[in-house]
Amino acid sequence: MSTVEIPGIKDTEFEATAAVDGGALVMRLWGNADLRVNGPLGPFLDQVDDQARRNHMGEVVADFRELVFMNSSCLKEFVRWIAQVEERAEHYRIRFLSDPDAQWQSRSLQALRAFAPNLVTIEIAKA
């Protein structure tokens, strides 16, 4: 398996990283995903997708447990990414880890799951 470093996003109030962990590609998001993050988030998700496809990953995990807030523009980037994955004949599953105390995550992730129920799962777990 060829592992290429995926450049993360680092801001004073937000951080996103991605790395292979076991048989899955795991991305971790921390802080506030607001308008400052919207620009680099799309290319970051595209690189995650490219890495997952090249390495024939069965699953990509998106760990939201330390994500305090995500605005609708950033959420739209996740919708675009999921749609892109779903359009292909060969795709991987996407599992979101969410914080049970973050009500916004429950609503937003359920909407993402409804968009692609055969692709997206949600796991509620404490950090």
Image (cartoon, grey):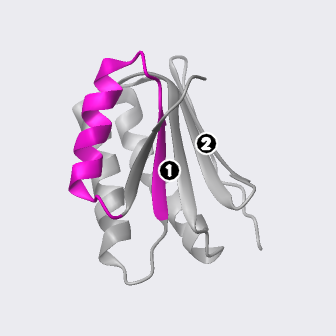
Residue 82 is one of the magenta-drawn residues: no
Q: Name the residue under label 1.
A: 44
The image's mark for residue 87 is none
Answer with left or right where residue 81 lies relative to residue 30: left
Which quarter of the rendering shows the C terminus?
A: top right
Answer with left or right where residue 127 lies relative to residue 96: right
Q: Name the residue under label 2.
A: 8
Give the quadrant of residue 111.
Answer: top left
Mark 1 near mark 2, Cβ–Cβ under 8 Å?
A: yes
Which one is nearer the viewer's eye here, 7 or 94?
A: 94
Q: Can you say whether 100 is above or below 95 in the image?
A: above
Q: Which residue is drawn at 32% across and 39% down?
A: 109
The spot of residue 51 in percent (x, y) is 60, 66
Give the residue type at disc 1: Phe
Answer with left or right where residue 55 lies relative to residue 64: right
Give the structural element (helix, strand or loop) at label 2: loop
The spot of residue 99 in percent (x, y) is 47, 24
Which region shows up in magenta?
93-118
Q: Can you say whether 54 is above or below 113 in the image?
A: below
Neighbourhood count class around disc 1 (C-alpha, 10 Å): few under 14, some 14–19, many 20 upward: many
Q: How many marks?
A: 2
Give the residue type at disc 2: Gly
